[in-house]
Image: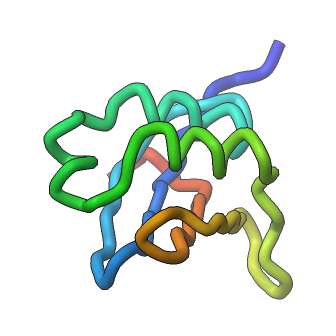
Amino acid sequence: MNKKKLYTVILEFGGGTYISQVSGESPAAALPNWMSQLQDQELAKWAITRNELISIIESDRPVPLGGCVGVWCLTGSVKNGLALINVVATDGSS
């Protein structure tokens, strides 16, 4: 049985940086959870659609970043430019 972990998801798009945290069994499993918590108002403000983000998540797998532990990246082209999504394994203790 896999245990859910905390991930920080960082979306770089349209000159903005949007950060949130979500749980999942893996970086790839955390991304649909991230999508489900995004509000339509946020997406409209960011000028990106839910379908564009879903397309990125479904067409690309998070790729580990060389030289880093617990950091993944995926990218995709959307109508208004390039979206870069970083996923960082996060220790939930504070």
The picture places residue 21, in percent across and down from the top left corner, at: 39, 46
Instruction: From this view, report whether residue 51 is shown above or below residue 17.
Output: above
In the displayed structure, 44 sits above or below 51; it is: below
Q: 85 or 25: which is nearer to us?
A: 85
Give me the residue at 44% from left, 45% from top: 92
Picture coordinates of residue 88, whole percent (x, y): 58, 61
Q: Is residue 42 left or right of residue 10?
A: left
Colour mapping: rainbow
State left or right for residue 21 relative to residue 23.
left
Q: What residue is shown at x 23% (from left), y 34% (from top)?
A: 39
Q: Position of residue 66 (x, y in %)?
A: 85, 83
Identify which residue is drawn at 31% across, 84% down. 15
Which quarter of the figure is the N terminus placed in? top right
Q: Residue furthest top?
A: 1
Question: How many numbered marks have been drawn onto this rendered protein structure?
Answer: 0
**Quarter assignment of residue 71:** bottom right
Q: Identify which residue, 38 or 43, lies in the foreground.
A: 43
Front-most of 69 and 57?
A: 57
Q: Tell me where residue 19 sits by quadrant.
A: bottom left
Q: Is residue 8 above or below residue 77?
A: above
User: Would you place residue 76 above or below residue 34 in this image?
Assistant: below
- Percent coordinates x, y for residue 2 in the rendering: 78, 21
Give the residue at the far front of this rendering: 79
* Residue for point 61% across, 31% down: 24
